[in-house]
Amino acid sequence: MKKFILFSLLLTLVFCDGKDKDVPTCEDCEHLKNRKISLEGVYGKFESRQQRAQHNWPFKPFGKACPVGHISHSFQYYSGEPYFHHGIDIRMPANTAIYSSTGGKVVNIENYKLGNDLYWEVAIIDEQGFLWQYHHVDRDSIPQSIFDAYKTKAAIPSGTFIGEVVYWPVKAYGKNFHHIHVNVLDGDGNYMNPLLFLLPLEDSTAPVIENIYFVKDEGTSAISPRSLSGNIDIIVKAEDKMDNEPYQLTIYKTEYEVVSADKKYKLPKTKLWQFDRLPGGGDINKDVHTVYKKSFYASGQYLYTSGNYYSRNFYIVVTNQNAGKVSGNGFWNTTKLPNGKYTVTVHATDFNGNTTSKSIDVEIKN
Ligand SMILES: [Zn+2]
């Protein structure tokens, strides 16, 4: 009997080592980097926020936005390489019916992480040529009509039932994280911000800026704001939440500006990046730690960016841009201003335009 128990225990250990078929090792996941995504027939080009198409969210009742657990620029690090989330997680109970936001052609039905039923995709190219990937669709719920549309290349109208939300076994914020992950790609393979294509969010909650830190350019120790010299990186601890939702999200647009105490000298508002698409285009890993500081030392402890099921902390290097692009070569060159007292102001803006600003008095001593 004892031998049998030992044997059972051994079996359990062997088969529950994290590779078990229904255990998510990541959310959408970083292995997508190595996944070949066909852009055949994808030609969408995003013009402007003003002219954007506003499709229904893929759940009933139509005509309103749904809860969002992650946005496209969320920092994600489970294991392996950190990455930008690159799509949105729409939170809905397991087995909720999913309806295509757009009309278009079904171009893929795939178990993109072979052997794990959490990772089924239904992909549709919409009438404007954008590729919509719906992930975490319950395989058994995908109707035959969608398989048929995939086979015959027939178009489906918007609002077509494409399957149900799969049961997600891992908890976040005390609840199972049932969701679908939606990516929208344009004709160049850029991961676009899906919020640009959906009915507006109901969100009037502004981001929160917790703290502002200064380090030497690409440095790893905070320095006193009362003695800044040379090239400086400004790090902002910030997060955003949507109305009545617990999920800590990252910032759509982060900017900084500098003005002298006597208002004579000024560094105009400089934007790190506006997340209408990923800075790396189709590369979800590129510039993750240019935007989000990996780690640094401040007030007696190491602070680091995190983004997983248990912890979300975002330290944004607002100075890491150069010539309009996210760049590790970006910094604030304090030698371009005379020595003296200044105020640094940081602005954090969410997708709906809710903005928070925080200022800190500094001194340049070159
Ligand atoms: Zn996701």
Image (tube, rainbow, N blue to C red):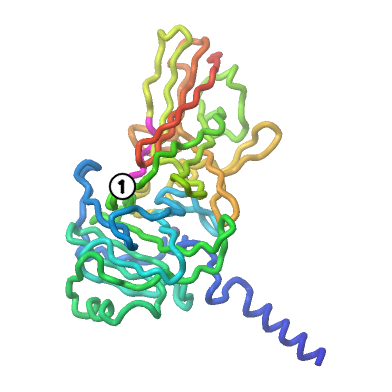
Q: Position of residue 158 (x, y in %)?
A: 22, 64
Residue 30 in magenta? no
Q: Residue at x 47, y 78 (%)?
A: 115
Q: Is residue 178 visible?
A: yes
State which image quarter holds ligand 1. Answer: bottom left
Give the class, few, some or many, for how many residues have Cα within 10 Å of label 1's Cα (few <14, many ≥20): some
Q: Position of residue 212 (x, y in %)?
A: 54, 29
Is residue 132 shown above or below 359? Answer: below
Is residue 272 shown above or below 18? Answer: above
Is residue 81 shown above or below 141? Answer: above
As drawn, is 36 to the left or to the right of 17? left
In the image, 301 versus 97, the foreground residue is 97
In the image, 139 versus 109, the foreground residue is 139
Q: Position of residue 294 (x, y in %)?
A: 56, 43
The residue to which callout 1 is attached is 200
- Residue 86, quarter of the rendered image: bottom left
As drawn, is 13 to the left or to the right of 316? right
SS state under label 1: loop
Is residue 260 shown above or below 117? Answer: above
In the image, 228 versus 238, the foreground residue is 238
Q: Residue at x 47, y 60 (%)?
A: 30
Three-letter amino acid code of the residue under disc 1: Pro
Q: Which residues are magenta?
A: 271-276
